[in-house]
Amino acid sequence: MLRALFDLAIACGRVGLLGYGGGPASIPLMEVEAVDNYGWVTTEEFINVLAMGNALPGPILPKMAGYIGFKVAGWAGAFVALGATILPTFFAMVLLFNVYWQFRDLPHVQGMIKAVRPLVIVLLGLLIYDMWPKAITSWQLALIGIVGLGLIKFANVHPAIVVVGTLVFGAFFLH
């Protein structure tokens, strides 16, 4: 049990500290830790956790860490994973923001910020590339994705409404 809690702290701490760009950029890192490095969940279960986490309000990474921690070591695991995900980032953010604020006008600092933005997009693209074949397994699911994209992007429907509508649709029409 102690080993599992230690592993959760290390894995979630790594994701929390290295996930520059927030949840979307952290998701591939969490997948590497939870699926590839430790085998706590399968890729299929990870996709389900991601889907459920996105259906709930709030930041995605703490929800995912809490679930995975609970699965690995019960409530203690959930608290360790959640703390390891949030606390190092919280302290790093307070420290780094103060440093950034003092040096934000320096060309090197501006260059660092500009350079890391495309990497965040690449991480998001890799997440889509890896999960697409597992999430879109039929033409109906592809159509749901396309309709959802259209509603959010072109019809300006709030994403929360699209998520709730999709959940309701899935409950009644996809078994």
Image (cartoon, rainbow, N blue to C red):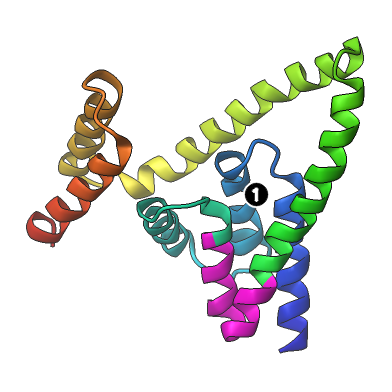
Q: Which of these two is toward me, 121 or 81?
A: 81
Q: Residue furthest left?
A: 173
Disc 1 element: helix
Q: Main secondary structure of the magenta part?
A: helix
How many tags in the picture?
A: 1
Q: Residue at x 74, y 16 (%)?
A: 114
Q: Which of these two is toward me, 98 or 146?
A: 98
69 inside magenta stretch:
yes
Quadrant of image for the C terminus: bottom left
Q: Residue furthest bottom?
A: 1
Range of the magenta residues?
Answer: 63-80
Q: Residue at x 52, y 50 (%)?
A: 59
Q: Residue at x 82, y 15 (%)?
A: 110
Instruction: Bin the neighbour count of mark 1 within 10 Å (Cα to Cα): few under 14, some 14-19, many 20 and up.
Output: many
x%, y% of residue 93? 78, 43
**For residue 44, which quarter of the picture?**
bottom left
**Above/below status of 50 relative to 28:** below
Q: Residue at x 52, y 40 (%)?
A: 127
**Above/below status of 66 relative to 22:** below
Q: Amino acid at mark 1?
A: Leu
**Above/below status of 11 relative to 102:** below
Q: Which of these two is toward me, 60 or 174?
A: 60
66 inside magenta stretch:
yes
Task: Identify the residue position indicated by label 1 in the image.
Answer: 29
x%, y% of residue 78? 60, 75
x%, y% of residue 149? 28, 29
Quadrant of image for the N terminus: bottom right
